[in-house]
Image (tube, grey):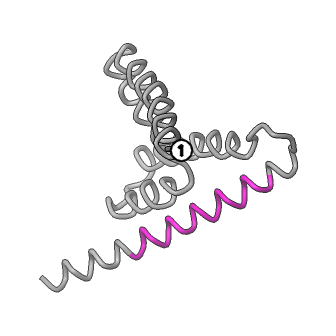
Amino acid sequence: SEGTIRLMTGTFVALAAAGAAGTLARFTLSGIVQRFAGGSFPWGTLAINLTGCFLYGLLLSLAERRMDLDPNIRRIVFVGFMGAFTTFSSLISDTGRLAQEGALLAMGHLIAHNALGIGVFFLGTRLGSL
C-alpha cells in the first residue's frame, strides 16, 4: 500500500542519514585520535572499536531497560549509525548474547570471526595480487 511504501522510504532515508553520520563520526574521531597519538599503530581504529562497543552496550541497555523505543528507531540507531561507526561493536554484542547460551558457543563465535576473517583477508590479498 501507499502508506507502507512511504514508511519504508522514510526508514531507508533515515538509515542512510544515520549511516552517513556514523561514517563521519568514525572518520573524524579516528583521525583526531591517530593524529594525537601518532605512530604507526592504528590507535584511531582501536579508539573507534572501543568507543563503539561502549556506546552499543550503553545504548542497548538504555533501549531495553529505560526507553520504549520504536523498532524502526532502534534499527536506525543500531544498524544505521552504529553499523557505520563500527561493526566490531556488533560482533561483541552478538558474542555477549551467545555467552548467555554458553561460554563455548561465544568463544567459538569469536574464534570463527577472527581466524576466518584473517584467513579470507589473506585469501583476498593473494587473489588481488594475481
On screen, residue 5 versus residue 75, left or right, reads left
Question: Dividing the picture into quarters, in which one does residue 7 lie?
Answer: bottom left
**Front position in the image: 63 or 17:** 17
The region drawn magenta spans 13-32
Query: Is the N terminus in the top left, top right, bottom left or bottom right quadrant?
Result: bottom left
Query: Residue at left 45%, top 71%?
Result: 16
Q: Is residue 68 above or below residue 19?
A: above
At label 1, which amino acid type do we have?
Ser
Residue placed farthest to the bottom in the image? 2
Which SS class for mark 1? loop
**Front position in the image: 76 or 85:** 85
Residue 103 within the magenta-colored segment of the rendering? no
Query: Residue at left 68%, top 39%?
Result: 46
On screen, residue 53 versus residue 72, left or right, reads right
**Front position in the image: 99 or 36:** 36
Query: Residue at left 76%, top 41%?
Result: 43
Q: Is residue 5 above or below residue 81?
A: below
**Front position in the image: 35 or 123:** 123
Q: Which residue is mark 1?
A: 129
Question: Dividing the picture into quarters, in which one does residue 110 lie?
Answer: top left
Query: Which x, y percent locates residue 103?
Result: 39, 15
Query: Residue at left 42%, top 73%?
Result: 14
